Amino acid sequence: MRKLKPCQILVVFLLLLFLSFCKTEVKEEKIPVTTKSETAKELYMKAYKAGEQVELAKARNLYEKALIEDPDFFMAYYQMATYDLYFGNEESFKEYAGKAVECEYDLSKGEELLKNALEKFLEDTKADATEIGEELVSIYPKDKDAYFYLYFFQYIIGNYEGGVLTLKKVIEIAENQAPIYNTLGYAYIQLEQFEDAKSAFDKYIELEPNLPNPYDSKGDYFMKVEEYGKAYESFMKAYDLDTTWMASYNKAMKAKEMLDSLQQE
């Protein structure tokens, strides 16, 4: 048998090393968003941004427009479906989730996992999809959305302790931390850790002082701890910043009603 020269051995070693590297799973930065329409993708990103700022009506409208541009847009259907699942709109959830799982695009690995989650929720809206979320995080460890999807799956089954841990990890990697602190505040409320909730909402206000939702969220906190005067002020601050936030105004009136009731006792 012919012996290889040292230089040839080195070449073979490097080749084998290269092939081994190619077979190693490469961690991706972001979960891809699959669509053939750039217009649909642009509308989707605007909708996502509106959702972060809790402009839910605007977000839904933009997702709907994205679906008009691309009727096979999986991620737009996914977002609409999970909004409805969160708010308990079961019939609407089934409609959007059904269309999502019927999408015919060659989806990314992340999208396929989210599709699997929707299939579980179509069978049982309280299904445990946390393993799917954990796999998403393992594949996309630098994508805050992967952690948010995991958090949502934890929220569905009432695992608020795990959800808090997940949100804290998101804070470490996210550029825009404001919506995370908002979600974290509500997770702490579920755990009745009210001082932590207050700190999270205060941080949210610090990061987004000119948006109405931080004050609306802080108002929800004050209502929970029965500080109705402060709740009224916080809800009205939200309304003063944006008078289209009628929900904040209505909550302010409820807080005032509760305060007046206490003062009359």
Image: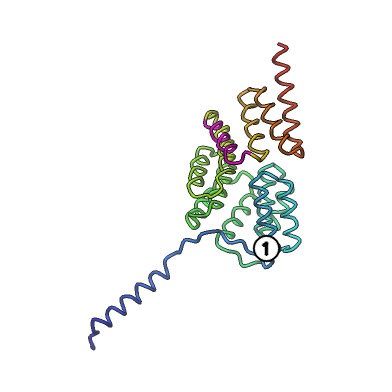
- 103 w.r.t. 151: above or below: below
Whether 219 is among the magenta residues is no
The residue carrying mark 1 is 103
Q: Which one is in front, 149 or 118?
A: 149
The magenta segment is 196-209
Q: Which one is in front, 93 or 41?
A: 41
Residue in view at x 66 percent, y 30 percent: 234
Whether 201 is among the magenta residues is yes
Which percent across, then down, holds residue 265?
71, 11
Q: Residues within 10 Å of mark 1 (few under 14, many from 20)?
A: some
Which percent across, then down, holds residue 53?
65, 45
- 231 w.r.t. 54: above or below: above
Residue in view at x 31 percent, y 79 percent: 12
Q: Which quadrant would residue 11 be assigned to in this image?
A: bottom left
Which percent across, then down, holds residue 222?
63, 27
- 223 w.r.t. 119: above or below: above
Look at the image and name its color scheme.
Answer: rainbow
How many labels sit on residues?
Answer: 1
Pick out the residue farthest to the top: 265
Q: Which one is in front, 115 or 255?
A: 255
Q: Which quadrant would residue 186 be assigned to in this image?
A: top right
Disc 1 is placed on an element classified as loop
Q: How would you classify the magenta stretch by its main secondary structure? A: helix
Residue 68 shown left or right of residue 149 in the figure: right
Residue 61 shown left or right of residue 183 in the figure: right
- 40 w.r.t. 49: above or below: below
Quadrant where the N terminus lies?
bottom left
Which percent across, then down, holds residue 107?
60, 64
Type of amino acid under label 1: Cys
Residue in view at x 26 percent, y 82 percent: 7
Pick out the residue farthest to the bottom: 2
